[in-house]
Image (spheres, helix red, strand yellow):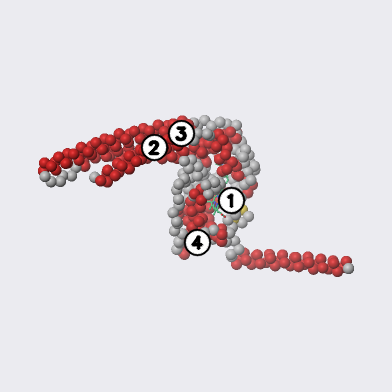
Amino acid sequence: MKAARLYAMGVVGAVAWVGALIAVAGCTSEQGGKGHELYVHYCSHCHGESGKQNEGFNWSSMPDPKPKDLTNKSEMSTFKDEDIFNTISRDMKDTTDVAEGGDEIGDDDFAVPTMPTFKYTLSEEEIWAIVGYVRGLHGGKMEFKVEERKKQLEAALLTAKTNLEQATKAYEAAEKQASEEAEKKSEALKKDVEPDESSYANELAVMVKAKKELDAAQAAMTNLVTRPGKGTSVARPDLTIKPDQLAKTVALGQRLYENKYGCNGCHSIGPDGGKVGPALDRAGFRLNGTWVFRWLKNPQAMNAESRMPALGLSDADAKAVTLYLTTLKSMTTEEDIQKAAAAAAAEKAASDKAAAEKAKEEKAKK
Ligand code: HEC
Ligand code: HEC
């Protein structure tokens, strides 16, 4: 019975910090200014501070389709607040053909990979603040009531907490009674009698169910008020790979980079791609694989203010993308080196020629 008792103690511990969570939720309600600040930090490089096309510094370097005009009232007002929320906070779809392993994409799915998701970076409350700001860009107003949602979640949390407290009391009383009966029997029979577990199995089941409901209510409240990656750390990855798997995994990594996570919307390789983040041409020379993997999984854990969002990469996806990036060592192929050598030789010939011409001129002057 020890296990169940320890479990009950865990349950009681969980109840104690619910109060603290509600206190945190209560003091984060300045919305308007926060939406503007977050938008400037995470969106304006692509969409422009006032939402107009070609206003953000990254707009013209992005692959097609280019970011939408968020000031276009007739188009933007066809979206519900929830639609905008779900665009900003969604799971990324792999736009590769289904036959080649891409995702099935329904009519109402937003599939553009070069618009990143913020689901794994910002709290729901922060995303709602951004939705409010986006509404203002086309002269609209957000109708969704974040304060009401918070109140509903708070009420649900308190109910779940009360239910668990009652269930715990009932369980403890039933267990105590069973122990007392067992003790009496032990005395009467002059030998050890175990408490009858089946006599409080029902109370235990009710308590376990109440604990699950409390966990769910807590998770809903946590998602609303705190950033998903907060306080998490990424374990050291295993980046070893069988030689015969390398080419396939690198190809998968490249596909994910372009067609699922839209990394090319913010980074360039060669002449193409966005310029919000550094060019990755020489990533294979400059960056360490373990570091890259950790960075991709949770940039905010390494730089809280990074404009690069956590994109929800699974370990397998992060490994493939990391292996792809470690192959990027521009100037390593024989062809690149020969090209560079030819260009350098041509440059030298041109400058030699210019010098010779200059010398000739000088001579002529004399
Ligand atoms: C890397 C560039 C980039 C960043 C950063 C970015 N977006 Fe986008 N956004 C896009 C692209 C590309 C599209 C899609 C254009 C299309 O489908 O025609 C888009 C589309 C949209 C749409 C239209 C949605 C629809 O259903 O058609 C909204 C709203 C939007 N973005 C809001 C935001 C907000 C808010 C942020 C910041 C939290 C943000 N975007 C960050 C590139 C970006
Ligand atoms: C919204 C823009 C954006 C998107 C999308 C994005 N990044 Fe970044 N990335 C950045 C910025 C900005 C930095 C610079 C570091 C910082 O902000 O702290 C960066 C840094 C990096 C670095 C470190 C580069 C260096 O030289 O230090 C790597 C590697 C990287 N990103 C890879 C990726 C990959 C792979 C993806 C797709 C899975 C991706 N990024 C998606 C904006 C973005």
Mark toward the start of the polypeptide (3 vs 1):
3
- The three-letter code of the residue at mark 3 reads Gly
- Please tell me the numbered disc located at residue 247: 4
In this image, 165 relative to 65: left or right?
left
Disc 2 designates what residue? 18
Front of the two marks 4 and 3:
3
Judged from the image, the secondary structure of the residue bearing numbered disc 1 is: loop
- The three-letter code of the residue at mark 1 reads Gly
Q: Position of residue 12 (x, y in %)?
A: 32, 39
Label 2 close to label 3 by CB (< 8 Å): no
Cα–Cα gap, marks 4 and 3:
52 Å
- The three-letter code of the residue at mark 4 reads Ala
Cα–Cα gap, marks 1 and 2:
40 Å
User: Which corner quadrant of the image does residue 213 belong to?
Assistant: top left
Label 1 close to label 2 by CB (< 8 Å): no
Q: Is mark 1 within 8 Å of ligand 2?
A: yes
Instruction: Identify the residue shown where x is 47% and y is 64%.
Output: 243
Mark toward the start of the polypeptide (1 vs 2):
2
User: Which corner quadrant of the image does residue 241 belong to?
Assistant: bottom left
- The three-letter code of the residue at mark 2 reads Val
From the viewer's perspective, is residue 266 above or below residue 74?
below
From the viewer's perspective, is residue 128 above or below residue 307?
above
Mark 1 Cα within 10 Å, few/some/many (few <14, many 20+)?
some
Mark toward the start of the polypeptide (4 vs 3):
3
Judged from the image, the secondary structure of the residue bearing numbered disc 4 is: helix
Residue 104 visible somewhere in the drawing: no
Could you tell me which quadrant the C terminus lies in?
Answer: bottom right
Judged from the image, the secondary structure of the residue bearing numbered disc 3 is: helix
User: Which corner quadrant of the image does residue 285 belong to?
Assistant: bottom right
- Please tell me the numbered disc located at residue 277: 1
